[in-house]
């Protein structure tokens, strides 16, 4: 019950350049179901590296029925079986002899071989009452018994010499839990097998190890019948390291001492987490930043091992439809993110908004100046009819807002968690601003962005990056126009007006104003005419992009001039303009900031390019003297469409880049 407190006292304090500690986990648990999973789940929650499999693999392997189902699905031989919930159940296809054992226990607890229904029912009754779980009834395989130890991970697995349990010539003999504790049977190692039998047994072991998602080490138990057919009985995802157990016996035969075996297991776990063995770490180039090397390795391993958690978090965000006017859902997302950031040591200041969701500012320090300010928005432009649910397809993740905003928030959370895992976060002065009206041009957020940016050394925008690794260093501004046109007829004779052809002519003229840096896009046209004297109507929605404000003003003048041009009919014209989004201009500060990102990307072997985006974002409100960049979220495309997506693996790469960038900026003088 006090494991967390004790671990905080015990785990070493990580200084700059040091590797985080690692737990050598051999905890079998004390009570309840799936006991092997308890400590690994706790360590996962705390972000502490540990030896051995994760809670998922332990849960599957400890459930013998689930293990056998996965083995069968992958054509790995295992004895036939039946599951009894009580002793009165009947199975017509059951063939004796069978072995009865608890469904979810280890170390041969409760095993009993029976050859008739009366004994079977009594054995099942005892198992169910004693262990409070279903009984696994398995086809008994007379013959020889083997135990095979494995060390490593999916890309490199070492199979230890095969151990045969000496059944003293009795093919019906089994080794119970009492036998293991009080009078263990002798072991023959290496087992006397043909070369073909040995290779097949090793192949089945490695295949089952990978399919069940086991990490670092395990033991596989076999029976082989008189015809040489092999059957996997079960796997132990936390093989005993007792001095007289088969795992240590096999390792000793392979040439390990007990001490070198323990160090080998530690090395395997360290490579999985940190990418290298602490006892065989390569010498770093003298010019390389020695302080960032451990963070780079530790963060990459942490992010890889927690990718599924990141995707789950992203899914939780995407299932909330945060349409810009859906204030309740935006605040719901804000509350969810507040809990996660508070857990990471951030305090929150909420700016209440009534027309849109609440703007939220977070900081992890007491001072006014941030080393960096991270900006993201929680709102999306999708109405309920346009909303697309989260889905995962091969290398892509889809969902409304996943590229525009929510993918970047997931990258930010992952980066902060990696920094916390590496014990770097508390040394960094970080601010986070979550806005709620990006879809409206940032009219409410503008003042908050300007105010908080002035107290930041750097500002980072978390919208999506281009598929080729693009980071936004400049972006066009944007004006939106809503135009309503109706005709005014003074004729007493009913007629069909020429309003729609006139409107189409004006749209064509407006479209011709487009140039390379100043583009006009028609978003919608709606028109209606009828036979009679009633006024006819048309409405147009369009936007223009521009490189600077003078271009914007000139384009607005020309659009209005075309609309007001006299036609053969009398027109009533109404032009309303939305909020202007200013352009984001590349400055000397931006270029210098980008060079820092480029240098880090080169060290990480990540693709990166600077590019101009056709529409600006909240970063456009950052004062020009503050270095800023946009597009450091995951790589994505098809924004503001039903096919909006991000690349799954870019969640790792961009989180790693952001992790190192945040750390780097905390040490760089502006």
Image (tube, rainbow, N blue to C red):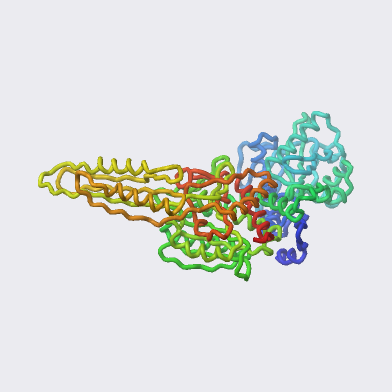
- Whether residue 380 is situated above or below residue 467 in the rendered picture: below
Q: Nearer the viewer, residue 568 or 248?
A: 568
- Decide if residue 430 is in sight here: yes
Dividing the picture into quarters, in which one does residue 499 lie?
top left
Q: Position of residue 362 (x, y in %)?
A: 57, 65
Q: Position of residue 201 (x, y in %)?
A: 77, 34
* Lateral position of residue 211 relative to residue 340, left or right: right
Q: Position of residue 173 (x, y in %)?
A: 80, 41
The single residue placed furthest to the bottom in the displayed view is 366
- Decide if residue 107 is in sight here: no
Q: Nearer the viewer, residue 68 or 632?
A: 632
Q: Nearer the viewer, residue 341 or 572?
A: 572
Residue at figure coordinates x 47%, y 62% from the top left? 445
Q: Nearer the viewer, residue 210 or 512?
A: 512
Instruction: Tell me the quadrant of the picture where the N terminus can be found.
Output: bottom right
Instruction: Tell me the quadrant of the picture where the C terminus can be found.
Output: bottom right
Q: Position of residue 2 (x, y in %)?
A: 72, 66
């Amino acid at each position: 019950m006090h494991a967390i407190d004790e671990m905080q006292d015990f785990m070493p304090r990580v200084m700059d350049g040091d590797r985080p500690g690692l737990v050598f986990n051999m905890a079998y648990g004390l009570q309840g179901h799936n006991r092997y999973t308890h400590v690994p789940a706790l360590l996962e929650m705390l972000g502490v590296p540990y030896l051995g499999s994760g809670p998922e693999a332990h849960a599957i392997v400890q459930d013998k029925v689930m293990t056998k189902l996965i083995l069968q699905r992958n054509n790995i031989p295992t004895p036939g079986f039946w599951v009894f919930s009580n002793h009165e159940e009947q199975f017509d296809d059951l063939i004796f002899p069978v072995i009865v054992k608890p469904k979810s226990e280890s170390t041969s607890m409760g095993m009993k071989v029976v050859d008739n229904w009366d004994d079977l029912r009594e054995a099942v009754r005892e198992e169910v009452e004693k262990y409070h779980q279903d009984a696994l009834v398995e086809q008994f395989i007379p013959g020889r018994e083997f135990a095979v130890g494995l060390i490593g991970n999916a890309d490199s697995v070492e199979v230890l010499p095969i151990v045969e349990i000496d059944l003293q010539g009795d093919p019906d003999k089994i080794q119970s839990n009492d036998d293991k504790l009080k009078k263990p049977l002798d072991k023959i190692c290496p087992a006397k097998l043909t070369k073909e039998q040995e290779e097949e047994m090793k192949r089945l072991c490695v295949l089952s190890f990978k399919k069940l998602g086991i990490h670092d080490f395990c033991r596989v138990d076999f029976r082989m019948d008189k015809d040489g057919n092999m059957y996997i009985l079960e796997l132990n995802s936390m093989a005993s390291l007792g001095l007289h157990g088969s795992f240590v016996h096999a390792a000793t035969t392979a040439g390990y001492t007990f001490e070198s075996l323990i160090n080998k297991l530690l090395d395997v776990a360290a490579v999985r987490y940190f990418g290298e063995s602490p006892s065989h770490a390569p010498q770093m180039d003298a010019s390389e930043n020695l302080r960032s090397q451990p963070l780079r390795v530790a963060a990459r391993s942490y992010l890889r091992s927690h990718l599924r958690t990141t995707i789950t978090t992203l899914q939780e965000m995407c299932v909330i439809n945060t349409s810009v006017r859906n204030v309740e859902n935006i605040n719901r997302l804000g509350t969810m993110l507040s809990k996660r950031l508070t857990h990471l040591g951030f305090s929150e200041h909420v700016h209440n908004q009534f027309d849109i969701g609440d703007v939220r500012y977070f900081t992890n320090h007491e001072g006014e100046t941030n080393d960096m300010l991270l900006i993201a928005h929680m709102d999306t432009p999708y109405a309920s009819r346009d909303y697309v649910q989260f889905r995962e397809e091969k290398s892509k993740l889809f969902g409304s807002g996943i590229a525009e905003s929510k993918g970047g928030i997931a990258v930010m959370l992952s980066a902060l968690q990696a920094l916390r895992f590496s014990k770097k976060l508390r040394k960094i002065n970080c601010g986070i601003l979550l806005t709620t009206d990006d879809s409206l041009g940032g009219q409410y957020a503008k003042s908050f962005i300007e105010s908080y940016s002035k107290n930041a050394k750097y500002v980072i925008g978390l919208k999506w990056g281009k598929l080729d690794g693009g980071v936004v260093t400049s972006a066009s501004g944007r004006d939106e126009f809503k135009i309503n046109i109706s005709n005014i007829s003074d004729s007493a004779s009913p007629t069909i007006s020429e309003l729609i052809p006139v409107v189409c002519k004006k749209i064509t003229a407006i479209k011709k104003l487009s140039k390379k840096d100043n583009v006009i896009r028609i978003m919608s046209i709606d028109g209606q005419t009828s036979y009679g004297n009633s006024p006819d109507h048309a409405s147009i929605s369009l936007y223009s992009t521009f490189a600077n404000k003078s271009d914007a003003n000139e384009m607005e003048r020309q659009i209005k001039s075309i609309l007001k041009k006299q036609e053969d009919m009398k027109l009533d014209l109404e032009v309303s303009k939305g909020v202007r989004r200013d352009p984001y201009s590349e400055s000397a500060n931006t270029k210098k900031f980008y060079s820092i990102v480029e240098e880090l990307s080169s060290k990480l072997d990540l693709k990166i390019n600077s590019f101009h985006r056709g529409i600006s974002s909240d970063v456009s409100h950052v004062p020009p003297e503050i270095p800023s960049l946009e597009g450091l979220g995951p790589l994505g495309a098809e924004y503001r469409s039903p096919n909006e997506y991000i690349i799954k693996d870019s969640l790792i790469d961009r989180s790693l880049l952001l992790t190192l960038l945040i750390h780097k900026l905390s040490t760089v003088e502006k």
